[in-house]
Amino acid sequence: MPDKILVTREIPDAGVRLLKDFEVCVLAERPPTRDELLEAARGASGILSTATEKMDGEVMDAAGEGLRIIANMAVGYDNIDVEAARERDIVVTNTPGVLDETTADVAFMLMLAAARRLGEGERMLRAGRWEWWGPKQLRGLDVWGKKLGILGLGRIGQAVARRGKGFGMEVLYHSRSRKKDAEKELGARYLDLDDLLRESDFVSIHTPLTDETRHLIGERELDLLQETAVLVNTSRGPVVDEAALADALQNGRVFAAGFDVYEEEPKVHPKLLDLENAVLAPHIGSATVETRDRMAAMAAENLRAVLRGEEPKTPVEP
């Protein structure tokens, strides 16, 4: 009898094809309810999850003692209780490296769109309200030559920095540890968080979600930004206090923001939805055909390796 693998959402065929030697249970495209997830997990030797499913001890116990791996089709793994998995000798893996450039593209896209008021202008045009060109109409901010502050200079942060260098931007960064090689390669300058927020014209967030980074950017931090600053978040929604951000945008304390992630996805703070200076995308950071194929394949390869008694390619350390 082949091992059972639960795939918690419909994923690209590039991943499913690699699991043909197993008994595969694929749930729907929409996120499963908690009860659906617990029921489907029963008897699974491996689970291929996405960032939207909470993988805690309850799910692991529902699967039973035969569960050997949870392969997350995402770089972040804050949806998985890694410690609970370790206690049960369950391997946890993620998909780092394959989506860095794609997510960096979206971060820079949001930066440009927010600075140049693209969303506001498109809505005006589509609604039939664009009646003439005018010298003072929809004036935004230049991006080239400005100071780009990167919060979290990991792989994605460095990819954004390289794009910034292409726009002649000065790269500033704050990270848990100094990145000397990246400083040399990118000419990046390390600052503490407060100084980075004060100096930067654009701030792009690329930190994981942990207890320490939850609401890392709140009212106090937003007040440190220049009134002409643009804030971009493609990391995890709860890193930013959305209510405080909405107030800062509405009151003109921050020029604009571009967001791809939210505190309570798919819900978005209602005040943000009403603001013209908020560019909002539906979590599309890795959403290209090529990248999602690579993510699905990597998660499947990790599953296959562990269930065959081999080492996974990208294990998460507790």
Image: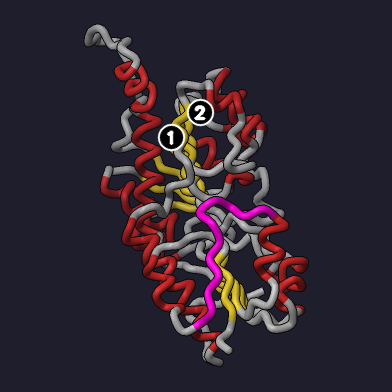
Q: Check if mark 2's residue and mark 1's residue have beta carbons within 8 Å.
A: yes
Outermost residue, left side: 133
Please name the residue that numbered disc 1 is placed on.
Answer: 201
First in residue order: circle 2 vs circle 1: 1
Q: Measuring 67% from the left and 69% from the top, which residue is drawn there? A: 41
The kind of residue on which mark 1 rests is: Asp
Quadrant where the C terminus is found in the figure:
bottom right
Question: x, y percentage for residue 99?
Answer: 40, 60
**Image coords of residue 314 (percent x, y):** 50, 76
Judging depth in this view, the residue of 147 and 34 nearest the camera is 34
Residue 226: numbered disc = 2
Task: Mark yes or no: residue 118 visible.
Answer: yes
Above or below, 246 relative to 198 = above
Q: Tell me the residue at 48%/28% (across/down).
A: 278
The disc placed on residue 112 is none
Q: Does the magenta portion include 32?
A: yes
Q: Quadrant of residue 11?
A: bottom left
Residue 43 horizontal/vertical position (percent):
68, 77
Q: Residue at x 48, y 46 (%)?
A: 283
Of residues 225 and 308, the one drawn nearer to the viewer in this rendering: 308
Q: Which residues are magenta?
A: 22-33
Q: Is residue 112 left or right of residue 306?
A: left
From the viewer's perspective, tell me whether residue 36 is left or right of residue 304.
right
The answer to which quarter of the image holds residue 138 is top left
Q: Residue at x 51, y 62 (%)?
A: 74
Q: Secondary structure at mark 2?
A: loop
Q: CA distance from mark 2 to mark 1?
A: 7 Å
Q: Nearer the viewer, residue 78 or 226?
A: 78
Give the position of the N terminus as an image quadrant: bottom right
Secondary element under disc 1, as helix, strand or loop, is loop
